[in-house]
Image (tube, grey):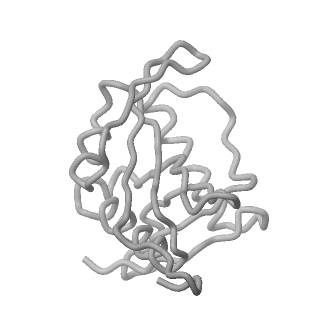
Amino acid sequence: MEMKAYHLDPDIVTPKLQEVGRIADESDKILGNTALYTFRDSRLLVGEDSSGHLVGFVQYYMLKKKPKITLHKICIKSIYRRLGYGSRLMYLLFRHCRECAIQSIELKCPVGVEANIFYEKLGFRLIDVVTVKTGRKMNKWIKTFPWSLNDNGTL
């Protein structure tokens, strides 16, 4: 399985960004989310198969004051699920964390959703169960990385 991954600017509307939006909408229907989808202020790591077809994306936020990422969403097109593309995208995000000296990734996932098993297999650690404004219970996960910055600001 080959996959090309790259960051997509969420502020420039392109056919690829519109396709990412359709994948997000498909995922939201499965999860029962009804909020309007937005990519504003986030970063998108998108993946394509060897033929250039969009496989899926990871949406995340980088905090300026702390070396951490908040993962908002990972979505894989239904025809590509369970083929390793989601794991591959996450490993590419982990590599990006190393390149940017990011020390952790945090996320929330609805309790009882199969994705929790996916995060656990990727090495995330369950740290809490919280109730969000909608009343939904969410597992809070964290993955920390072993690297840290030297005194001169390098890894």
Examine the image and state in which quarter residue 14 appears.
Answer: bottom right
Examine the image and state in which quarter residue 18 appears.
Answer: bottom right
Residue reaching furthest to the right:
12
Quadrant into which the N terminus falls: bottom left
Residue reaching furthest to the top:
135
Vertical order, 131 against 142 (above or below): above
Front residue (pair 79, 114): 114
Vertical order, 78 against 65 (above or below): above
Vertical order, 96 against 123 (above or below): below
Vertical order, 146 against 126 (above or below): below
Front residue (pair 79, 97): 97
User: For this view, does 43 lie left or right of residue 125?
Assistant: right
Front residue (pair 97, 65): 65
Examine the image and state in which quarter residue 146 appears.
Answer: bottom left
The image shows residue 71 at horizontal and vertical percentages of 51, 51
Label count reads 0
Front residue (pair 76, 136): 136
> In the image, what residue occupies the spot 71% across and 62% down?
10
> In the image, what residue occupies the spot 39% across and 29% down?
128
The image shows residue 32 at horizontal and vertical percentages of 48, 25
The image shows residue 150 at horizontal and vertical percentages of 50, 81
